[in-house]
Image: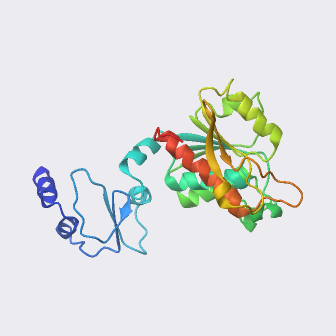
């Protein structure tokens, strides 16, 4: 095996490696997270995944294929990750789906509400979920996207008496409430019971204002805010999928950056 490994990497060419395994013409091959058809050099330790379209792989292989688009460094960080999502509406459902697709090891999802028809204009649910608890509907969807994510759900109303216990396993909490009182509560707890957590809150994503107004800022030592910080939902300015999803993915992306110990 060591002789074969040495021979493979002494050539430094991806096609030479593929030829060794009679796979010169795979449907897709991914080198260190990047799908390419170029004749690239490869280095010792490179991560290469070969994919045949239309074939359902075994579970272990499926997992490696799902993870293939990440860098090895990100996959290492994800193995130890636990992120909480407080509220599973327009923000929270989109945050959870994005983090599941990336491959977060554990998600703690909290919401006491059910899916309603009016939720479908911006929340990541389907008609078949109407009447279901949001936490269970989202857990079911994630199992169909990335079955290797450990999803913990809580059907409970979050307040200052239980928020620390619910999110105890998490290092990062994404605030995704749709009311000011709950948003204020979790930000206040960031300096008290949640002071060892990174909080990613949201403010200002209503209407159809410019996407470029939505940003990510560091608000306090362990509190970050995503949104335009101005355009709240009100009569004549509702919440809609495009800007809500942009803000949600700002939050999800910041969670990844914090896992990787990168700056905002």
- Please tell me which residue lies in front, 194 or 167: 194
Q: Residue furthest right?
A: 235
**Left or right of 121, for residue 235:** right
Task: Give the image location of residue 249, x and y in percent.
Answer: 61, 54
Residue at the image point whose x is 76% and y is 27% from the top: 161
Task: Give the image location of residue 252, x and y in percent.
Answer: 58, 49
Q: Quadrant of residue 241?
A: bottom right
Residue at the image point whose x is 58% and y is 41% from the top: 83
- Please tell me which residue lies in front, 66 or 251: 251
Q: Quadrant of residue 30?
A: bottom left
- Please tell me which residue lies in front, 204 or 109: 204
Task: Give the image location of residue 230, x and y in percent.
Answer: 76, 49
Task: Give the image location of residue 19, x and y in percent.
Answer: 18, 70
Residue at the image point whose x is 12% and y is 57% from the top: 10
Q: Is residue 197 above or below residue 122?
A: above
Residue 124 visible: no
Residue at the image point whose x is 31% and y is 72% from the top: 37
**Left or right of 94, for residue 73:** left
Image quarter in which the C terminus is found: top right
């Amino acid at each position: 095996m060591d002789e074969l490994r040495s021979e493979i990497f002494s050539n430094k060419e991806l096609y030479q490696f593929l030829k060794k395994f009679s796979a010169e013409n795979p449907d897709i091959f991914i080198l260190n997270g990047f799908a390419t058809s170029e004749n690239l050099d490869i280095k010792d330790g490179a991560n290469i995944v070969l994919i045949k379209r239309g074939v359902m792989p075994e579970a272990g292989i499926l997992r490696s294929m799902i993870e293939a688009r990440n860098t090895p460094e990100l996959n290492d960080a994800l193995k130890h990750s636990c992120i909480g999502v407080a509220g599973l509406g327009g923000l929270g459902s989109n945050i959870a789906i994005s983090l599941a697709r990336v491959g977060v090891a554990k998600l703690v999802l909290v919401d006491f509400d059910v899916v309603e028809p009016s939720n479908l204009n911006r929340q990541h649910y389907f008609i078949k979920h109407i009447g279901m608890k949001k936490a269970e509907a989202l857990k079911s969807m994630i199992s169909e996207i990335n079955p290797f994510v450990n999803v913990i759900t809580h059907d409970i109303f979050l307040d200052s008496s239980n928020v620390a216990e619910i999110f105890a396993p998490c290092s990062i909490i994404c605030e995704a409430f749709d009311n000011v009182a709950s948003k204020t509560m979790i930000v206040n707890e960031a300096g008290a019971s949640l002071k060892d957590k990174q909080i990613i809150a949201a403010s200002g994503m209503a209407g159809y204002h410019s996407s470029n107004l939505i940003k990510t800022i560091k608000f306090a030592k362990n509190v970050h805010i995503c949104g335009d910080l101005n355009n709240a939902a009100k009569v004549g300015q509702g919440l809609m999928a495009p800007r809500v999803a942009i803000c949600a993915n700002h939050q999800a992306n910041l969670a990844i950056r914090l896992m990787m110990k990168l700056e905002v």
